[in-house]
Image (tube, helix red, strand yellow):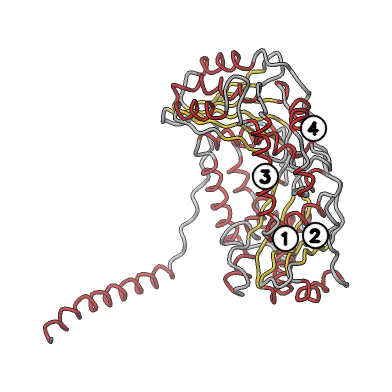
Amino acid sequence: MASLALRRSRPAQLALSLAWLFAAHTALADKQAAPAAAPPRPFTLPVHQDAALDNGARVTTTAYGSVAKAAVVLFIRGGNAEETAQQTWLADLMGSSLGEGTRSRPAAQLAEDAAAMGGNLEVSVEPDQTTITLEVLSEFAPRAIALVADIARNPAFPPADVARVKADLVRKLAIARTQSQQLAQEAFSGALYPDHAYGRTLPSEALLGGYTVDQVRAYYTEHVGAARSHLYVAGRFDAAAMQKAARDALGDWPRGPEPQPVKAAPPAASSVRVVDRPGAVQSTLIVGLQVTTPRSDDYVPLLVTDSLLGGSFGSRITSNIREQKGYTYSPFSAVRTPEANASWSEQADVTTNVTGASLTEIFKEIDRLRGEPPSADELRRIQAYLAGVFVLRNSTRQGIVRQLNFLERHQLTDDYLRNFAQRVWAVTPADVQRIAVTYLDPKRMTIAVVGDRKQIDSQLVPWTGKPAATPPPRK
């Protein structure tokens, strides 16, 4: 027994010694200044070739990466932004039905053809565009272009398949109606973008369930065509061959409807919206307002300000209500930029009994930044983070495509991407304070809360002076 005890003690002594050495090293490291951030490396935007076809379709090819793969992405301008109040999610139904077969290929054949090229077909509907994506081995890129073009040009919209897609969307809607984050976003968007398509995030089940195949086909005819389409191909390939494949696939597509620019929403009045969830043990909060768009010189400083305030794990609001107070696990803020519009918002799921306290701390951090600029050290850490995120967003074929698409949607030049990191590092502490004062005015902010009204209404009185408003009933 004695020898056994001796054998056990040696690992324990070793662990203790290692722990002591680690602690000593950590203590020493704590006394040393953090290394200075390296100067920003110039971002080299991959060379891309742009072409405009006679029917209005556009084609962009860009050489990227060393792996023999290619991302084929077709953006069709027009998504939820063109829906009327009686068409919410009709664009989703139309877009999701695109992949259900063409006039020459049923859905199963589409999936098999994509898989044979080493790819997976995806169709998504966004606020201002519909996207068809297929990433394949480079040798199959011309065939992938033809397949994507066939889906966009020749959808069959089989009634049985459209009905199944609609049933899937009805189920997704039912699930969304049970999620506090979705309900909060619906209330927040409705208040932020009143009488605007961006303010209509969820339909009623009756509205969604009533859509017909004829409505889907009519929506396609009114919103899809060559003039609204931009094909991007990124990867390793012969650019001339890709341009030819694109012309062969899209060149004789009828021009179709002309693209319609999304209207900027009028400024929204500040308000507090509450969605009642009796018995809820937590509240979902969204606080925010409309801000400047990417076309403004203030946009990059706004991104830096957002990252410092709430948009990164090391941000002030996260440190306050997560690390110090323990009110929430994963708060976050973001600047969102649908076409012609932009908003800033902070979101958090908090324990019900600290709903008001959480709002107090969020607004306290906003006011603190408006009243005093951050230190140079704090700002440098945020700048390094944001510059690093930018590199990651440009590290894939689809990432490059998305960045180029961002330029097009917001009418920016390539210099926006080339100089992004330098512009981030050029932001000063005074700039951050100025941005907070100019754009993040608490008096203009909208607050959306999903929680138990019996417990949270009294907590919201400091912002409303009265019981909070309930969102208008859905039509």
Residue 25, above or below 333: below
Count of numbered labels shown in the rendering: 4
Nearer the observer: mark 1 or 2; the answer is: 1
- Label 3 – label 4 distance at C-alpha: 27 Å
Residue at image mark 3: 169
Residue at left 77%, top 63%? 275
Q: Which mark is residue 445?
A: 2
Element assignment for label 3: helix
Q: Is residue 296 or residue 157 the one in the foreground?
A: 157
Residue at image mark 4: 261
Badge 4 amino acid: Pro
The quadrant of the image that shows the N terminus is bottom left
- Label 2 – label 3 distance at C-alpha: 32 Å
- Label 1 – label 4 distance at C-alpha: 28 Å
- Residue 100 lies left or right of residue 78; in this view the side is left
> Quick check: marks 1 and 3 in contact, CB under 8 Å?
no
How far from the left and from the top, in percent, is residue 321?
Answer: 63, 70
Residue 142, above or below 20: above
Nearer the observer: mark 3 or 4; the answer is: 3
- Residue 48 lies left or right of residue 30; in this view the side is right
How far from the left and from the top, in percent, is residue 232?
Answer: 59, 27
Element assignment for label 1: strand
Q: Is residue 152 or residue 138 the one in the foreground?
A: 152
- Label 2 – label 4 distance at C-alpha: 27 Å
> Which residue is the extreme one toward the bottom?
2
Residue at left 48%, top 31%? 119
Residue at left 67%, top 34%? 162
Residue at image mark 1: 286
Q: Residues within 10 Å of mark 1 (few under 14, many from 20)?
A: many
Q: Is residue 430 or residue 419 the one in the foreground?
A: 419
How far from the left and from the top, in percent, is residue 227?
Answer: 73, 22
Q: Which mark is residue 315?
A: none
